[in-house]
Image (cartoon, rainbow, N blue to C red):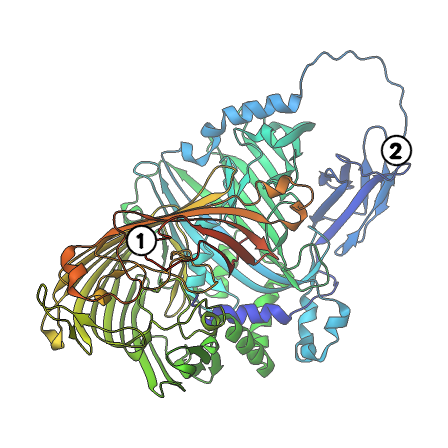
């Protein structure tokens, strides 16, 4: 994945920051646990009240509570029917832990007869579910509002021992900004903050939702791409949906149609909130390790809309790198007609180690406020007709402090106000730049060196049958050199063939949003025909180390290519390429053709081609992150379609052949209710013309032990060739559906995956007879190729192991026995 250096500087900044307990002005934060004095058992549903104010909360199922406030108060009261109340003095403007034990107390009450069958909470839930469509945002024909979103990242889990290390000597001034979380009592240091002010427009039919970012700023770093990714539109959690996507995982909403199959509900209170009589329900999961929440919600009587809701992911949910995550939403009765989301807050505790306080981790906070709602306004065609879903106004990142003081929906805390100044100060320290460079090198493979970057380091050394040991040096210009133009070049040498190889590329960015760029490149190097676009290149050291069988089917290629990319709007891109290639056979390969039917074979030294290529890429509502030069796709709920047409121009720059090539590729991933998620890839293509085998479709094989989802993993290179073909790959990831319910292994949090691949192609007689195929190369002969596999992913959170079976084409050739079964490994990062 290619990224950009500014985002990595933020990562480096967070890697070495630490925190310790400190006073935070004005805000009082309290966490604690309420237990039974006689048994020591936690007491759920106990009332926690801040005396002298209207503030209060309830303990959860584990007897724990948390509360923060700015009001003046002197003590806290904990009470529950059947127990004597307890009081504890509190210290204002500080974080504190208050654990109380309640003493059981008996009461003599008059006899009361209650006749009720069933759970009253279930009856209220039924009314909530019945009114979901009416109360959800999708029930409106059109509306608009202003959104203010604040996102903050904080370093946590830093011990005093680590704080005393020399590594942090230059940064000791940062500890005055330390704060403490009421989620789990961890002290933290705010290190990054972004603020966004937007206008949001929604129309039901034809469906459109647009966000206009009016103002944005990012910890003193100006980067509109990050601002776009962190925008409100992509962050909002819709509780009325049955499934709530969080970090690409499908959590079950507590008010889903099938919620009672996953949760137990309890009616714990009813009272007025403002002028609305509300019911307070608490809920918890029925089973372990499912993607569910614990928490509570308040339901407004009559409308049965959600007034407030608190969600917290189940402590044993099968999700990676997130030790805790809490969501709080508040709704307001607006325009005397609708319950609208007015405040949305989320906090996540990230760490590579589960449930630890020894390893540095990070909090991620996101707070959004919404106001100025307008319902069924006159249609604003200017905004709703915009091709992109998110639009950033030209001056959005240039707003002064005075603007933000007036525009914010809520003020910044003292620690938040200090982030901008703190980050700017840290960036001026030379040691900080060293940390940035180290993290950037590990993440991107390039070592910063002034205005240049050396690398990638994974290609410094490799080996193969043709070159022997291969050594390579290379580099590219950095963003400090230019944000418009990037230069890249490399030089390689093989000790066996004693040849130099080299290449270079120039990229010029006309615009980044929408994306418009021009790329020109040249290379004289070795290439593996039939290598999938997802595979490691042959000069990557991992490809050399994990290879199965000799790499003796390489081809030397001299290639000049120029490409122009034009993004019309988010989701539609066209590219135009001109490619001139000269290919030379190496190793066991040779280019032998039969110019006429039944003529004598002719050995040709090379093949020239000149072709023009037209691409159309359609990715509706695609989310992505883009840097100064590269873009990385995050997700799209819709199929991503790529259509490519190429025309081989004869006699242009010595081109030997005329041909037409048309390919179409469709891929999509989608959640599959509560049983995981699936992904499919479909590809079809056809080639017109009489051509030698290097210009036909050489189907993607894999001769390494590294799993490749875009190749046939038990097919060798140069095994099958076609001029018309079709393939489909389907994989389903169960996300622990089976393993989560097996007591002996569910703590490992392994996840199951199954996949199948089918590939079929045909070859015209004229192409079959035109050139001599090397080795085992052949056509499918009317029998599709099949592979199937099962895998376990999430081993140590990052490793995936697949067992794959080749189901046919096992005895096509005499004395040739391809592998029927193989084990493959890969690194797989997923929440």
User: x%, y% of residue 110?
Assistant: 85, 14
Measure the C-alpha gap from mark 1 to mark 2: 63 Å
Give the residue at x 53% y 58%. 829
Q: Is mark 2 on a helix, strand or loop?
A: loop
User: x%, y% of residue 464?
Assistant: 41, 77
Q: Residues within 10 Å of mark 1 (few under 14, many from 20)?
A: some
User: x%, y% of residue 793?
Assistant: 55, 52
Instruction: Work out whether residue 397 or residue 240 is closer to the camera in this orientation and state it.
Output: 240
Q: Mark 1 vs mark 2: give the one in front.
A: 1
Is residue 410 among what the camera can see? no
* Looking at the image, residue 635 lies above or below residue 555: above
Q: What element carries label 1?
A: loop
* Looking at the image, residue 597 lies above or below residue 83: below
- Relative to residue 803, is residue 63 drawn left or right? right
* Looking at the image, residue 772 lies above or below residue 526: above
Q: Quadrant of residue 630?
A: bottom left
- Relative to residue 29, is residue 407 drawn left or right? left
The quadrant of the picture occupied by the N terminus is bottom left
Give the residue at x 55% y 68%. 11
State the residue position of label 2: 84
- Relative to residue 334, is residue 364 drawn left or right? right
Is residue 208 among what the camera can see? yes
State the residue position of label 1: 571
Instruction: Work out whether residue 700 or residue 88 is closer to the camera in this orientation and state it.
Output: 700
Instruction: Work out whether residue 468 or residue 367 is closer to the camera in this orientation and state it.
Output: 468
């Amino acid at each position: 994945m290619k990224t950009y250096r500014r985002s990595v500087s933020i990562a480096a900044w967070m890697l070495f920051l630490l925190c310790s307990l400190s006073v935070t002005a004005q805000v009082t934060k309290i966490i604690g646990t309420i237990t039974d004095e006689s048994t020591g058992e936690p007491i759920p549903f106990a009332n926690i009240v801040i005396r002298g104010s209207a503030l209060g909360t309830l303990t959860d199922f584990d007897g724990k509570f948390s509360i923060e406030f700015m009001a003046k108060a002197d003590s806290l009261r904990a009470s529950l029917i059947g127990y004597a109340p307890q009081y504890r003095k509190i210290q204002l403007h500080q974080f504190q832990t208050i654990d109380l034990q309640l003493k059981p107390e008996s009461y003599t009450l008059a006899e009361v007869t209650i006749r009720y069958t069933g759970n009253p909470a279930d009856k209220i839930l039924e009314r909530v579910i019945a009114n979901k469509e009416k109360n959800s945002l999708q029930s409106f024909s059109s509306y608009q509002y202003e959104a203010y979103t604040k996102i903050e990242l904080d370093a946590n889990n830093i011990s005093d021992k680590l704080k005393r290390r020399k590594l942090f000597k230059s940064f000791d001034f940062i500890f005055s900004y330390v704060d403490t979380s009421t989620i789990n009592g961890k002290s933290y240091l705010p290190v990054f903050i972004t603020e966004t002010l937007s206008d949001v427009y929604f129309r039901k039919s034809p469906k459109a939702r647009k966000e206009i970012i009016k103002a944005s700023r990012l910890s003193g770093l100006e980067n509109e791409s990050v601002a776009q990714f962190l925008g409100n539109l992509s962050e909002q959690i819709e509780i009325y949906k049955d499934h709530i996507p969080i970090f690409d995982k499908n959590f079950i909403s507590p008010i889903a149609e099938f919620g009672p199959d996953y949760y137990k509900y309890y009616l714990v209170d009813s009272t007025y909130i403002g002028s609305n009589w509300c019911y307070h329900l608490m809920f918890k999961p029925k089973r372990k390790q499912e993607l569910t929440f614990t928490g509570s919600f308040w339901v407004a009587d009559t409308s049965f809309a959600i007034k407030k809701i608190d969600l917290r992911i189940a402590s044993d949910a099968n999700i990676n790198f997130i030790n805790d995550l809490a969501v709080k939403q508040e709704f307001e009765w607006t325009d005397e007609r609708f319950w609208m989301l007015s405040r949305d807050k989320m906090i996540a505790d990230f760490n590579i180690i589960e449930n630890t306080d020894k390893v540095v981790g990070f909090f991620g906070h996101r707070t959004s406020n919404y106001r100025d709602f307008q319902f069924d306004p006159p249609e604003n065609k200017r905004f709703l007709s915009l091709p992109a879903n998110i639009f950033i106004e030209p001056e959005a990142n240039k707003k002064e402090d005075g603007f933000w003081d007036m525009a914010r929906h809520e003020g910044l805390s003292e620690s938040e106000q200090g982030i901008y100044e703190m980050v700017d100060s840290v960036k001026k320290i030379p040691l900080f730049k060293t940390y940035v460079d180290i993290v950037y090198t590990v993440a991107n493979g390039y070592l910063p060196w002034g205005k240049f970057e050396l690398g990638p380091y994974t290609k410094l050394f490799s080996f193969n049958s043709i070159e022997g040991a291969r050594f390579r040096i290379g580099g590219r210009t950095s963003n400090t050199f230019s944000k418009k133009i990037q230069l890249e070049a490399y030089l390689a040498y093989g000790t066996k063939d004693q040849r130099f190889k080299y290449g270079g590329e120039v990229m010029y960015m006309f615009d980044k949003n929408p994306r418009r760029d021009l790329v020109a490149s040249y290379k004289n190097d070795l290439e593996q025909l039939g290598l999938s676009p997802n595979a490691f290149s042959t000069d990557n050291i991992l490809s050399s180390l994990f290879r199965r069988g000799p790499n003796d089917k390489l081809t030397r290629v001299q290639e000049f290519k120029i490409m122009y990319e034009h993004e019309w709007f988010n989701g539609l891109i066209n590219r135009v390429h001109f490619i001139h290639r000269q290919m030379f056979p190496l190793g066991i390969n040779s280019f032998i053709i039969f110019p006429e039917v039944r003529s004598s074979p002719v050995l040709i030294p090379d093949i020239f081609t000149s072709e023009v290529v037209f691409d159309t890429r359609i990715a509706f509502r695609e989310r992505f992150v883009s840097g100064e030069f590269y873009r990385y796709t995050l997700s799209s709920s819709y199929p991503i379609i790529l259509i490519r047409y190429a025309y081989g121009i004869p006699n242009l720059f010595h081109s030997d052949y005329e041909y037409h090539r048309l390919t179409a590729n469709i891929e999509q991933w989608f959640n599959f209710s509560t049983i995981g998620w699936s992904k499919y890839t479909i590809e079809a293509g056809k080639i017109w013309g009489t051509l030698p085998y290097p210009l036909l479709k050489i189907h993607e094989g894999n001769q390494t032990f590294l799993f490749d989802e875009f190749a046939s993993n038990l097919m060798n290179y140069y095994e099958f060739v076609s001029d018309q073909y079709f393939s489909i790959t389907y994989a389903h990831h169960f996300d622990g559906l089976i393993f989560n319910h097996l007591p002996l292994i569910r703590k490992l949090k392994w996840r199951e995956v199954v996949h199948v691949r089918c590939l079929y192609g045909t070859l015209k007689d004229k192409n079959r007879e035109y050139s001599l195929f090397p080795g085992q190369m052949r056509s499918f002969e009317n029998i599709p190729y099949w592979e199937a596999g099962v895998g376990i992913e999430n081993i140590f959170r990052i490793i995936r192991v697949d067992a794959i079976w080749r189901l046919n084409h096992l005895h096509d050739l005499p004395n040739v026995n391809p592998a029927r079964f193989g084990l493959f490994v890969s690194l797989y990062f997923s929440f």
